[in-house]
Amino acid sequence: MLTHLVLWKYRDDVPRETRQEHVAQLAALPSHIPEVESFAVGFDVVRLERSYDTGLIAVFKDRNALEAYTVHPMHKNAADFGRSISQHVASVDFQNEPA
């Protein structure tokens, strides 16, 4: 399994409604992209100085499934939208190791 983690730090001038639209676009992805094994997205609730505004965790069977997700048109639209309203986006993709 492969875990995909993304964090968005929105620009200060981005209104709440636009932030909510971004999260709604992201939340819709699993119902359109069958390669997604599990998916969670939401706004930060702790709001520490180091916190990002929104986070996403998606799990895929393998690298091919992640690639199918990455090139899917709905994902591309949501990713482009997220970049356009963010001052910084961070991501990491890692292989899940057995416990």
Image (cartoon, rainbow, N blue to C red):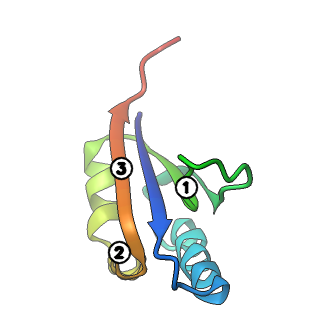
Circle 1 packing at 10 Å, graded few (<14), some (14-19), many (20+), is many
Closer to the chain start, of discs 3 and 2, is 2
Q: Mark 1 and mark 3: span between their CA atoms? A: 10 Å
Please tell me whether residue 33 is drawn above or below residue 25 in the rendered image: above
Q: Is 14 located above or below residue 60 in the figure?
A: below
Q: The disc labelled 1 sits on which kind of residue? A: Gly
Q: Which residue is mark 3?
A: 91
- Residue 84: x percent and y percent? 35, 82
Question: For the point 49% across and 50% down, which residue is it?
Answer: 58
* Residue under numbered circle 1: 55
Q: Could you tell me if the residues under marks 3 and 2 are in contact, i.e. CB atoms within 8 Å?
A: no
Q: Mark 2 vs mark 1: which is more N-terminal?
A: 1
74 sits left or right of 45 in the view: left
Q: Which residue is mark 2?
A: 83
Q: Nearer the viewer, residue 17 or 5?
A: 17
Q: Name which residue type carries label 2.
A: Arg
Residue 15 found in image quarter: bottom right
Labels 1 & 3 near each other (Cβ < 8 A): no
